[in-house]
Image (cartoon, rainbow, N blue to C red):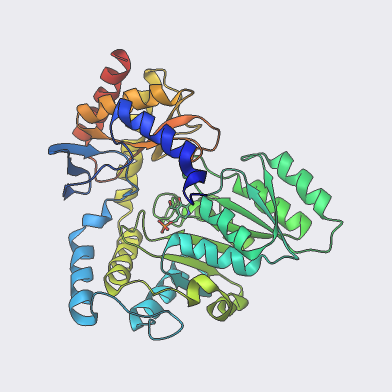
Amino acid sequence: MNIFDKFRRLAESGRALEKEFGSFFNVVMEDILSSTEAVINGRRVILAGTNNYLGLSMDPECIRAACLATEKEGTGTTGSRMANGTFSGHVALEKELSDFWGVTHTIVFTTGYGANLAVLSSLSGPDDVVILDSDCHASIYDGCRMGGSEVFRFRHNDIENLEKQLRRLQKRNASVLIAVEGLYSMMGDRAKLREIVDLKQKYGAWLLVDEAHSLGVLGENGRGLVEETNCLDGVDFITGTFSKSLGAVGGFCSSNHRDLEILRYASRPYVFTASPSPSNIASARQALRIIRTSPELRKRLWENTHVLYSRLEKLDLKLGPEPSPIIPVRYEDPHDALKIWNSLLEQDVYVNMVLPPATPDGSAFLRCSMSAAHTPEQVEIIGDAFAYAVSSA
Ligand SMILES: Cc1ncc(COP(=O)(O)O)c(C=O)c1O
């Protein structure tokens, strides 16, 4: 028995698509020109598929902070947070994130994936129940699987369906944790957080909100959907990542529960991996400062978002349910999506191609994302490229 046999069908369908459309899975950014431009296949391309919502991966102050930290503290920590991998920067960032969210405790992890894995696998054991929005990110699913809890899904943003499950579980003597995202990573829509908090309180459940895509993007001060909906007091755990609006690599969990600190002993993804590098911590700290002091970046991001969303709407494309910096363009048939994706790249515009099973509803889609760093001209070029691709498809 060949150990790779189980992947044969997947590999065959991947190869067939690549034969027809080229290697869309392995696009290489040959040169990074700015946070919105790179060289791909030798050509200068506009990036309209990154998570660089505020353009901070190339911010001069963030780069300088990362360089200084590398010179002073080295390229890596060479150890877990639990052992020699906690530097003063990690502790300072934890305090800054707590101040930012207005909570008492924060733990920094090596990635956002690791943060969800750590929190969910530790908090949800075999005697607990987790109820997830069906569109939740893989890291939330994987954390539950690792913890061994019983998992129920409620239909995406369907509050009645969530209540039905909470009512049914009321009879059981188990801790129930609800997990949702602030801004959903694929469809770009917001959780109905106010209603979810009301239900959580009514049924005595716990609530985790992953603000990976909403940190720096939503809320007057960039404090995500919990700020926009004024729901912070009703949320037990906020998780998130440095890999999107903060332009670095790392993750965190913030909470008012003192017992969160137990995870520093109990959580395998905290204990058994090296901590984030000094450069990532330093640039994330600087990016957080910029988020706090530069609301104009958020304003520009949303201006760009509204322009592109309305241009794509006019093309009668099937978009996500609401204007948001994540704009999915959906197709029933992956071949149709791939044709448009190829045409866009030929016109020097890159968006992300997302195929099932990574999509929530089995459709294929082009995931566009906007950045505060896109110029108005670039946004128009992206819109023009879509118009041409659609008219010539
Ligand atoms: C909702 C959500 N949570 C967590 C993550 C993981 O973040 P990271 O890239 O830091 O591992 C992602 C990344 O795609 C995400 O979309």
Image quadrant holding the C terminus, namely top left
**312 relative to 131, above or below:** above
- Which is nearer the eye, 79 or 92? 79
Q: Is residue 111 visible?
A: yes
Q: Is residue 138 left or right of residue 132?
A: left
Nearest to the observer: residue 42 or residue 186: 42
Count of numbered badges drawn on the protein:
0
Q: Residue at x 78, y 56 (%)?
A: 203
- In the rendered image, residue 171, in percent from the top left (x then y), is placed at 87, 56
Q: Position of residue 141 (x, y in %)?
A: 58, 53
Q: Nearer the viewer, residue 82 or 253?
A: 82
Which residue in the rendered view is the most extreme toward the bottom?
Answer: 84
Q: Is residue 328 visible?
A: no
Q: Residue at x 18, y 70 (%)?
A: 67
- Across and down, in percent, residue 144 comes to 62, 59
- Judge from the rendering whether residue 254 lies leftward or rightward of residue 370; answer left or right: right
Residue drawn where x is 46% and y is 48% of the image: 4
Q: Is residue 207 above or below residue 25?
A: below
Picture quarter with ligand 1:
bottom left
Looking at the picture, does residue 357 appear above or below residue 267? Answer: above
Tell me if 70 is positioned left or right of 238 in this view. left
Report the front residue among 218 and 31.
31
Single out the residue that lies furthest toward the right. 171
Query: Residue 240, position in %: x, y?
Result: 46, 60
Q: Identify whether 170 is placed above or below 330.
A: below
The image quarter in which residue 313 lies: top left
Residue 112 falls in image quadrant: bottom left
